[in-house]
Image (spheres, rainbow, N blue to C red):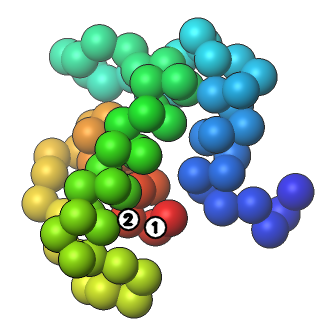
Amino acid sequence: MLTDTIFELVARNAEKHSDEIAIIGLSEQPITYVMLEKQILETITALQRHGIGSGDCIALVLPNGPMLAMAFIAIAS
C-alpha cells in the first residue's frame, strides 16, 4: 500500500519473511527483518525515554551503513 510507512513495511516483512536478510553492510553481519524490526523498536523506545518525540529535530552522525538506515527508520517512525 502506498500509505504505509517504512517501519510498517519492515514490520510486515518481519512477519512474512522473518529470517530473510533485510540489510547487508560491507563489513558487518547481515541483518534479518526480525533483527531490524527489533533494533528499530529499541531505538524508538530509547528516544522516547529521553523525551524525544514526534516533531523533535534529531541529527544523525553515522557512517553510511546498516546502523544509519536503522536509525533513520526509527526516527522517521
The Cα–Cα distance between marks 1 and 2, rounded to whole angstroms, is 4 Å
Do labels 1 and 2 touch, CB within 8 Å?
yes
> Which amino acid does the dot numbered 1 rest on?
Ala
Q: Position of residue 61 (x, y in %)?
A: 12, 60
- The number of discs equals 2
Residue located 69% across and 46% down the image = 9
Residue farthest toward the right in the current orientation of the protein: 1
Q: Mark 2 points at which residue?
A: 75
Tell whether 59 sits left or right of 74: left
On the image, the x and y values in percent for residue 20 come to 60, 13
| Mark 2 secondary-structure assignment | helix
Q: Mark 1 points at which residue?
A: 76
Q: Which residue is drawn at 64% across and 40% down?
A: 11
- Mark 1 lies on a secondary structure that is helix
Query: Residue 38: x percent and y percent?
Result: 43, 33
Label 2 is placed on what type of residue?
Ile
Along the line of sight, the residue nearer the viewer: 42 or 25: 42
Q: In this view, does 42 lie to the left or right of 73?
A: left
Seen as rendered, the residue at the extreme front is 49
Q: In which quarter of the image is the N terminus?
A: bottom right
Residue 44 x, y percent position in the rendering: 36, 57
Q: Residue 8 carries which label?
A: none
Q: Which of 49 and 68 is in front in this view?
A: 49
